[in-house]
Amino acid sequence: MGKPSFVEIKTKGMNGMKRILSLVLIVCFLMLTLIGCGPKNSQDIVGDLSKQAEKMTGYKSKASLSLQTGKTPLEYDVEVWYKQPDLYRIALTSKQNNVTQLILRNEEGVFVLTPHLNKVFRFQSEWPKKNGQVYLYESLVQSIVSDTARKFHVEGEQYQFEVKAEYQNRSLTSQRIVLNKGLTPQKVEVMDSNMNPMVVVNYTSFEMDPKFDADAFDKERNMQAAVLDSAPAMANVTSRKESKSFGVIEPQYMPKGTELASVNQIKGEEGNQIVLRYSGKQPFMIVETRSKAAVASFASGEPIDLGYTTGILTGEEKKSLRWDHNGVEYLLSSGVMPKEEMVAVAKSMFDQVGK
């Protein structure tokens, strides 16, 4: 056989170079593919979370809520309906006494319904834009997105974030939010400054983009349905009204430099009132009466989460905080107390025995 010509050698060399180049390109493509399919980091998840929250038309969720308010935690079932852009229906049912409260936001305004007392409060408010709630998905998303110092790690099939807690209760400083791979919530723990879990939410279901009936957020429909469900609780309230006086119920928390000045009992056509007056640096007054049905309308106000019930805060210069618990209606008013102090006083009155 003769020696290969120069042309044949050159052709073989070029073919070899093409094969090597093809192999290099394949390797590079595989590396890029592997990099693109690698585990997502915190920024990736936050970006996906923001897009999902903006894209969704609404959601329905169910969860159990536990509040550490003392020796015995308070347990609630929480059901949330949300429809873009600003329709809300939140049902909070106490597992201790099977009493349900509803918070509605619709085209008419914001309502707090207490069906077992046949009581409705209506007011104009931007709630919940200014006050995040631990059981609202959009509040959790906002907490994650806005905290640039967030901590993140993957645990099995779950994403876990540790971020600042920005709720009405200032003693709650941080929260741990657990999402599944579909970016829906699984569990939330809100901690105090010592990292003790004070609020725990365990989600049992979360449905994205559900269908709602035309009257799903209607006040009358929700009130009537809830009244029927609350018949046993209403009977219990009636029996308590027929029993002896509830006595004088005092707060366990007191602002510094403030003390009890007087206690008066005022007799009226609709029953007796207990009036407690406090004097000092932050004077205030508490009026206690038997709970009664009422429909009240205010120019402005906001729902206040007291842990064991939902209160109504109204007024600017002189603030008033109203709430019901165990058949007693409370009205706390002050011209100088900050909102946080009023809430602290109200929370300290949970399950106090009348004297």
Image: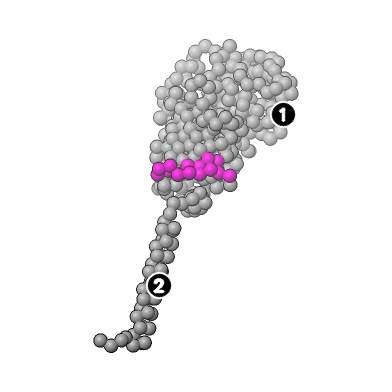
Residue 157 drawn in magenta = yes
Q: Which residue in the protein does label 2 denote?
A: 21
Q: Nearer the viewer, residue 121 or 59?
A: 59
Compared to 92, does 232 lie above or below? Answer: above
**Image coordinates for residue 1, horizontal then vertical, percent:** 25, 86
Q: Picture quarter containing residue 193? A: top right
Visible residue check, residue 137? no
Residue at 46% from the left image edge and 27% from the top image edge: 75
Q: Quadrant of the C terminus?
A: top right
**Image coordinates for residue 80, horizontal then vertical, percent:** 46, 39
In what element is the residue under mark 1?
loop
Q: Which residues are magenta?
A: 149-163
The residue under label 1 is which amino acid type?
Val
Tell me whether circle 1 and circle 2 mark residues in contact (CB < 8 Å): no
Which of the numbered marks, if any, corresponds to residue 336?
1
Residue at 36% from the left image edge and 78% from the top image edge: 15
**Image coordinates for residue 301, horizontal then vertical, percent:** 61, 36
**Whole-number angstrom distance, CA of label 1 to CA of label 2:** 79 Å
Which of the numbered marks, if any, corresponds to residue 232?
none
Q: Picture quarter containing residue 168? A: top right
The residue under label 2 is which amino acid type?
Leu
Q: Picture quarter containing residue 127? A: top right
Residue at 57% from the left image edge and 39% from the top image edge: 164
Compared to 251, does 342 lie above or below? Answer: below
Q: Nearer the viewer, mark 1 or mark 2?
A: 2
Mark closest to the chain's N terminus, 1 or 2? 2
**Image coordinates for residue 32, horizontal then vertical, percent:** 43, 62
Local crowd at mark 2 within 10 Å, few (<14), some, or many (≥20)? few
Q: Main secondary structure of the magenta part?
A: strand
Q: Nearer the viewer, residue 42 or 85?
A: 42
Residue 336 drawn in magenta = no
